[in-house]
Amino acid sequence: MARLAGCSVFDPFGDRVGKVRDVLVVYRKTNSPRVVGFVVEVPGKRRVFLSVGRVTSIGSGQIIATGLINLRRFEQRGGEVRVIAEMLGRKVTLTDKSGEATIEDVAIEEQGPGEWSVSQLFVRRPKTTSFGRGQTVFVNWPDVVETITAGESQSATQLIASYSDLLPADLANAMLDLPEGRMLEVAEELSDERLADVLEEMPENEQVDILNQLDDDRAADVLDQMQPDDAADLIAQLSEERGEALLDLMEPEEAEDVRFLLAYAPDTAGGLMTTEPIIVSADTTVAEALALIRRHELAPALGAAVCVTLPPFEPPTGRFLGMVHFQRMLRYPPNERLGTLLDQALEPVMADTHAAEVARRLASYNLVSVPVVDETHRLVGVVTIDDVLDYLLPDDWRSTDHESSTKSPNSDTSTATIPVRTARRTTHGTH
């Protein structure tokens, strides 16, 4: 890695776009650190981030990248460690009990297409005499342990590494068990995408506490990574001034979706829906639709069906034609057009339909999602089963020690209630 410092980065056409200044890795609980990208200096001395997924070749003193490079100024995020600036010079203990050593260089190896991780370290042992330098040796990553001073608290980076295999909901619970100051420290170190996933699994009070600790630019980046409906719920809990400031800093498309959702009352279909379903035309084939469903970042509930509309295909769309469930697609040949497979029995709900009616609709017809349309029958989003559950459950349902306040059904005074969430501010848009 030390030899990569200063080497040139080229685009697929052979044009030089910058030079490498550092390599970014993230620690993992069981495996060696994974390479996530490079810090590249582009003209103007600006340092930007180049994802390792955009790198097609490393070698011969150069890196070849594909696609566009985001010229936003590089900011180191949670769990990221710079190899040249931070890892080189660290003390490690050799597991063969031969003592301590200092890292002088790091080797990375390609584990699969676009997947690189640390494989070996070049370390130097302390000198044994008053003359010369200590002995150098190559060691594999599993054969060393980084030295931590006795009594020193675990760093947030190391803590995040121990949490790297947790699902967002489990990580959220683990963070909620930490002291407030420690929780905020870990939140600061998480990447934007990881923090967004975790915030979506936290109670609103903790979401607000964490977001209030972030500067506006970082907070806007995190909100960009959240689902629009979750981001809208969070912004609705902030002061009007802070909410507007963050919306202005968000990516225009993401901010537009959030402003659109803020216009609806929280106890309506419009207030519960997400604006990012899969939307296609009637001419789309089964094969094309299944390819869209296979995207790994797609939530399971959104992948259960696709919406078919007239153009345009961004909410609010053209006229809504119907939905096609993925199980129905599996029963037809790949070249079948979705326009012939529409579920004629499924009626959409209006954006102002009460949340209780949406819940009854999902339960009555065994659905995992229901389309939402406006007064002109344009698709504006879908409500998924997880959105409804999040609405119906008590505010503190994420707490592991929560005890239901609903009385026994054998009690004469038992009641069934639907909790009401705090109404969103409507100053961000009009209904």
Image (cartoon, rainbow, N blue to C red):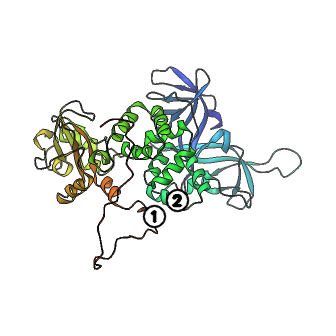
Place residue 357 in its image quadrant. Answer: bottom left
- Seen from the viewer's position, the closer of residues 205 and 33 is 205
Whole-percent x, y for residue 113 in the image: 44, 41
Q: Which residue is mark 2?
A: 176
- Seen from the viewer's position, the closer of residues 257 and 140 is 257
Give the mark, 1 or 2, whose residue is nearer the N terminus: 2
Rendered position, 214 above or below 147: above
Mark 1 Cα-neighbour bin, 10 Å: few <14, some 14–19, many ≥20:
few
Q: What label sits on residue 399 in the rendered view? A: 1
Rendered residue at 63%/56% (across/down): 143
Outermost bottom residue: 410
Q: Amino acid at mark 2?
A: Leu
Left or right placement of residue 396 versus residue 304 in this view: right
Whole-percent x, y for residue 177 in the image: 54, 62
* Image quarter (top left, top right, bottom left or bottom right) of the C terminus: top left
Residue 55 in view of the camera:
no
Q: What label sits on residue 208 in the rendered view? A: none
State the SS at label 1.
loop
Mark 2 Cα-neighbour bin, 10 Å: few <14, some 14–19, many ≥20:
some
Marks 1/2 in contact by CB < 8 Å: the verdict is yes
